Image: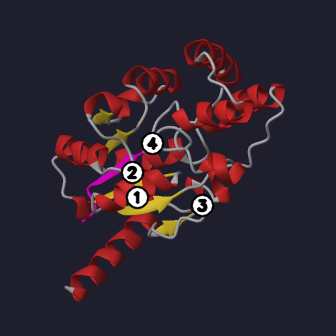
Amino acid sequence: MIQALIFDFDGLILDTETPLLRSWCEIYEQAGLIVCRESWAGLLGATADPPQAYELLEDHLGHPVDREALRERRFARELELLRGEPAMEGVIDLLSEASARRLLLAVASSSERSWVEGHLRSLGIYDRFRAVITADDVERTKPAPDLYAQALQALDTHPRDAIAFEDSLHGVRAAKSAGLFVVAVPNEVTRHLAMPEADLVVNSIAELMLDDYVALAEARRAQDGERT
């Protein structure tokens, strides 16, 4: 039986990726640079502050930039855009359903602990998670499976008994590498990318009920067992 749900954070629980993109686009536009959404979406999931974002700007300008000053300026703008942002559609209801069924809950995020925990507390849902695993806890972030391996260990759960919810290609690959059933929930930024490695793709977490997710994961597990 499915015993646990493990969630990505950025772009899945809270739409931090639209403010991230907007804050970078404002910087790019001032420099006369346009970056297509497909290219940008491919950067997400591995780190909260993609070094490739700076490289795009430097390649366009033809010289290095003061990355630390740019980071502080952009981060302040991102926080401004995030102020008052609610949890993404369906997240709170799914957490409530899972708690009612006594499923174990965890977060596996490539972002820093202070960022993730701070927002979870602001949303009032931090205490719902048995474990919050972040970039502070592993040497390799997504697409490496380390974050999911740590989350499974913290929950004392086998990969076959857990469902991962992800919004990025890096995240999907990390969860699949760790052996989980993966639900991809692309957001406005990442929906421009195909995610063929996911077991299921939905437009919103609210698209299905918890029982539906569990039934699909268990059906896939049964099929995999028949193949072996």
Q: CA distance from mark 1 to mark 3?
A: 22 Å
Q: CA distance from mark 3 to mark 4?
A: 26 Å
Q: Is residue 102 left or right of residue 41?
A: left
Give the SS element for disc 4: loop
Front residue of 161 and 65: 65
Front residue of 51 and 126: 51
Q: CA distance from mark 4 to mark 2?
A: 6 Å
Q: CA distance from mark 1 to mark 2?
A: 6 Å
- At 52% from the left and 33% from the top, the residue drawn is 51
Query: Can the viewer see residue 50 in this picture?
Result: no
The residue identified by callout 3 is 207
The residue identified by callout 4 is 46
Which residue occupies the extreme front position in the image? Answer: 62
Front residue of 89 and 37: 37
Mark 4 touches mark 2? (CB < 8 Å): yes
Mark 3 touches mark 4? (CB < 8 Å): no
Image coords of residue 156 (percent x, y): 15, 47
Answer above or below: position of 50 versus 211: above
Q: Quadrant of the N terminus?
A: bottom left
User: Which region shows up in magenta?
Assistant: 1-7
Mark 1 touches mark 2? (CB < 8 Å): yes
The residue identified by callout 2 is 143
Q: Quadrant of residue 64?
A: top right
Image coords of residue 16 (percent x, y): 60, 33
The residue identified by callout 1 is 173
Image coords of residue 228 (percent x, y): 19, 85
- Mark before the other along the chain sequence, 3 or 4: 4
